[in-house]
Image (tube, rainbow, N blue to C red):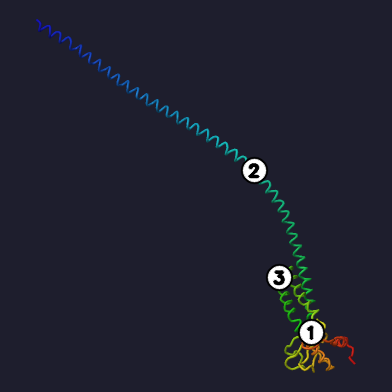
Amino acid sequence: MKLIQWCCTVFLLVPIGIAANSEEMQRREIMREIEQYRSRIDNIDMEIADTESRIKDDSASFISYTARIDSVRNLRSTRIDSLTEEIQKEKVRKDSLTAHTGSLARRIRSYRYREQQFSSHLMASMERYHDSLSLLPPSIAESPMRDLTMLKQDVDDGSAAPGEAVDRLWLILNRFSTGRFSIDSWSAPSAYEGIDGSAHYLRVGYAFLACVDAAGKRGAYWSPRKMSWVSFEDAGYAETILRAIQMREDRDIPDIIPLPIPYISTLEEGVSHE
């Protein structure tokens, strides 16, 4: 009987224990799921917080970028206004330059015309000076005539500007003009056929040029009218010229030498010496 009771008790308690274990397992499963949900919720909250932070940073960056864009737009607008003003100024300058260019072109044409006139006058002056030099003995006129010929060539081919040409002509005239007030003597091969070998020359300015032999016996003077050497008819003139040369070269006692310039002048005028 007791065995039957024990068995009945066991059969009654086993379903109750099984049911209790099942409820505990369900509770634990529910708690585990709850923990999982909480963990997922926490992760979601962290993602939301992170997203909000990024949104705030992006919003601040966007605001800063927008501010920079506005600043750049303002600067661009100011620069456009400045460039527009500069363009207007450049247009005014261009118009002024165009007018000035036209005026300058007229001045250049006028200058070239005056330059041509000046070159013509300069060439005419050099021609007159060349004609004057041609009346002098070659020994005197050779150097200035050579310089004058070179100057004329440079003016003709345009290698010498008017200002330079005037300066060069002035130098030629100045160097030549200094000889008008000087007395010079030298020895050189005779240019007068009446004297063989070397001769002594005496130049008084450009008014008188004579040559004599070493003995003072034969001599001649240069005649601008005849463009040749003319013999002294009076032999004493040759001796006088030689003495003047010796005085000029400090080889004789200074004295008043009556050069035959008046005599030559009368001959050039066609008046007989006699």
In this orientation, does residue 228 appear?
A: no
The C terminus sits in image quarter: bottom right
Mark with earlier residue (1, 3): 3
Residue 6, given in percent of the width and then of the height, sits at 12, 8
In this orientation, does residue 212 appear?
A: yes
Q: Amino acid at mark 2?
A: Ser
* Residue 135: quadrant of the picture: bottom right
83 shown above or below 115: above
The residue closer to the viewer here, 30 or 273, is 273
Residue 31, given in percent of the width and then of the height, sits at 30, 19
Query: Residue at the location (77% across, 90% down)?
Result: 192
Q: Nearer the viewer, mark 1 or mark 3?
A: 1
Residue 215, given in percent of the width and then of the height, sits at 77, 94
The label shown at residue 116 is none
Mark with earlier residue (1, 2): 2
The label shown at residue 160 is 3
Q: CA distance from mark 1 to mark 2?
A: 80 Å
* Residue 172: quadrant of the picture: bottom right
Q: CA distance from mark 1 to mark 3?
A: 34 Å
Query: Residue at the location (71% across, 76% down)?
Result: 150
151 shown above or below 224: above
